């Protein structure tokens, strides 16, 4: 009961912070979705760098260390490379978004390519990718709360209660609620990760080095990349895919709009790779659990951190771990809900009704939040993929937006809207067909060298995407692209009153 009480205290604290964040603000669409473009270094850091500390940190990273070993280290590599990329990418995105008063990721593509249809396509791709990512958070929330409470709350009820809480404060406070809750989340989770990663190897083996020696003796195959499957080529291609896709997630992309100025990104790019190193301690927990709580198979490997925690610590500490895990679901989950609703309202609904006012779009976005939450609940209760598998599928989809984005930043835009759309469609279709069929590059083309067969299918889709984009652009480029028209993206005068 102590653990359950602590978890509920965290839930109430998160809900209170989220609702309080609205105080004193006229919550128009710009305030609700991008914070009135007034966030400083700390909030932007927590929204972008803190994005890596989700339920994925608690469950997926430790679960892969437990079940797959060395391939899990891709998680440590990709975000560090993405943060380096952000030093150049995000200032360019922010400048253009501020100049044209963009709200969503899709707005960027609409303005750059002068194509509302392309914007709708980007919005739909983003939402389809964000649903499995949100499902990941909700699945993780259910697992964390159920195990931490010793089964007193079922995972189903935990998911429902958590979804109601995040839906409530997202609808009312938007990104302000996410930002303030992320402060509590990051402080707590960093403390928990460091304590678990240092204490558990010392408690059971006498230190981190001794722990790795014990794992090497019992399961030496877990400490090296296999020669096939998750081999070196899989590792490198997955790191590449995830690095270029990190800021293609619509919630990460549009969160960058919330910064006060572009210097925020350059300051953060210096420190964010160091922040990533904290994930090492999560891996230490997973490797320790291999010998302490053996026998977890398949998706149950995601339970390794929680199983070893409940076996080692008193109830009150387990409650704190459960509360921290709850926050890792609520913060990214709130951003995913808000961004999905904004994309659908602003770039899909408005395509059918282009003269809809910004005020009406803002209300519609808020109304879409509970609807999207219900869709995510359905898939949460009717899906069986592991935590990391869900994330990798989403990454493979959103990364297909990267070639068109990169081309749009060139001094002379050589890619047409038709080329950009064709590339995205080819890339997304490739990912969807291969994923839904359960095929791999190796099973489709068995005669290729092993290194090629092991490539992440998202990278193969990215290559096909680029070829289609360039080819179709060459065919359709009969004249220089027309200047981007952003009038349809600008809020109407009455909707911007009171913007902070």
Image (cartoon, rainbow, N blue to C red):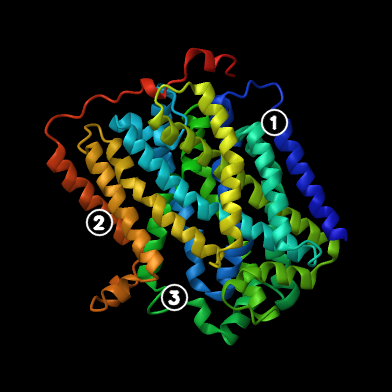
| Vertical relation: 79 (above or below) 357 | below
The residue carrying mark 1 is 21
CA separation in Å, label 1 and label 2: 44 Å
Quarter placement of the N terminus: bottom right
Image coordinates of residue 414 in percent, x first then y, are: 20, 37
With 180 as the anchor, is 272 left or right in this view? left
Quadrant in which residue 485 is drawn: top left
The residue shown at (42%, 53%) is: 243
The one nearer the camera, 5 or 305, is: 5
The residue carrying mark 3 is 225
Q: Of helix, strand and loop, which one carries label 1?
A: loop
CA separation in Å, label 3 and label 1: 46 Å
Residue at the outermost bottom position: 218
Quadrant in which residue 461 is drawn: bottom left
CA separation in Å, label 3 and label 2: 27 Å
Image coordinates of residue 328 in percent, x first then y, are: 65, 52
Say which mark, if any, is on residue 336: none
Image coordinates of residue 155 in percent, x first then y, are: 71, 62
With 343 as the anchor, is 431 left or right in this view? left
Which callout, 3 or 2, points to the residue nearer the camera? Answer: 2
The residue carrying mark 2 is 464
Q: Does label 1 or label 2 sit earlier along the sequence?
A: 1
């Amino acid at each position: 009961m102590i653990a359950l009480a602590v978890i509920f205290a965290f839930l109430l604290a998160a809900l209170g912070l989220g609702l309080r964040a609205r105080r004193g603000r006229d919550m128009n669409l710009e305030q609700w979705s991008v914070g009135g473009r007034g966030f400083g270094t700390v909030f932007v850091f927590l929204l972008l760098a803190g994005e890596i500390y989700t339920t994925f940190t608690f469950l997926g990273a430790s679960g892969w260390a437990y079940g797959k070993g060395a391939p899990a280290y891709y998680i440590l590599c990709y975000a560090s490379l993405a943060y380096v990329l952000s030093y150049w990418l995000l200032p360019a995105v922010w400048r253009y978004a501020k100049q044209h008063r963009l709200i969503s990721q899709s707005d960027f593509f609409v303005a750059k390519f002068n194509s509302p249809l392309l914007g709708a396509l980007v919005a739909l791709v983003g939402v389809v990718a964000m649903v499995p990512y949100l499902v990941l958070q909700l699945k993780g929330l259910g697992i964390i709360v159920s195990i931490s409470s010793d089964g007193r709350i079922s995972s189903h009820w935990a998911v429902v209660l958590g979804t109601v809480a995040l839906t409530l404060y997202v609808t009312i406070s938007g990104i302000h609620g996410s930002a303030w809750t992320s402060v509590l989340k990051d402080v707590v989770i960093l403390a928990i990760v460091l304590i678990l990663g240092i204490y558990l190897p010392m408690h059971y083996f006498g230190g981190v080095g001794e722990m790795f020696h014990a794992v090497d003796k019992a399961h030496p195959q877990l400490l090296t990349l296999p020669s096939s499957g998750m081999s070196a080529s899989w590792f490198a291609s997955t790191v590449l895919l995830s690095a270029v896709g990190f800021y293609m997630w619509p919630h990460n992309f549009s969160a960058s709009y919330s910064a006060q100025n572009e210097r925020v990104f350059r300051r953060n790019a210096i420190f964010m790779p160091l922040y990533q190193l904290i994930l090492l301690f999560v891996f230490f927990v997973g490797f320790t659990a291999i010998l302490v709580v053996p026998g977890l198979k398949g998706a149950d490997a995601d339970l390794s951190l929680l199983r070893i925690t409940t076996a080692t610590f008193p109830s009150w500490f387990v409650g704190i771990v459960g509360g921290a895990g709850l926050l890792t679901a609520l913060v990214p989950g709130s951003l995913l809900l808000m961004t999905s609703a904004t994309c659908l309202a602003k770039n899909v609904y408005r395509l059918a009704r282009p003269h809809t006012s910004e005020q009406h779009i803002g209300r519609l976005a808020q109304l879409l939040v509970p609807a999207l939450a219900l869709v995510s609940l359905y898939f949460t209760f009717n899906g069986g993929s592991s935590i990391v598998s869900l994330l990798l599928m989403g990454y493979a989809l959103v990364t297909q937006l990267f070639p068109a984005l990169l081309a749009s930043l060139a001094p002379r835009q050589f890619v047409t809207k038709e080329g950009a759309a064709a590339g995205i469609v080819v890339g997304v279709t490739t990912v969807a067909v291969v994923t839904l069929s359960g095929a791999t590059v190796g099973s489709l083309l068995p005669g290729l060298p092993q290194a090629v067969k092991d490539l992440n299918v998202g990278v193969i889709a990215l290559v096909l995407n680029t070829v289609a984009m360039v080819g179709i652009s060459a065919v359709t480029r009969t004249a220089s692209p027309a200047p981007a028209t952003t009038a349809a993206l600008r809020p109407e005068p009455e909707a911007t009153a009171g913007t902070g």
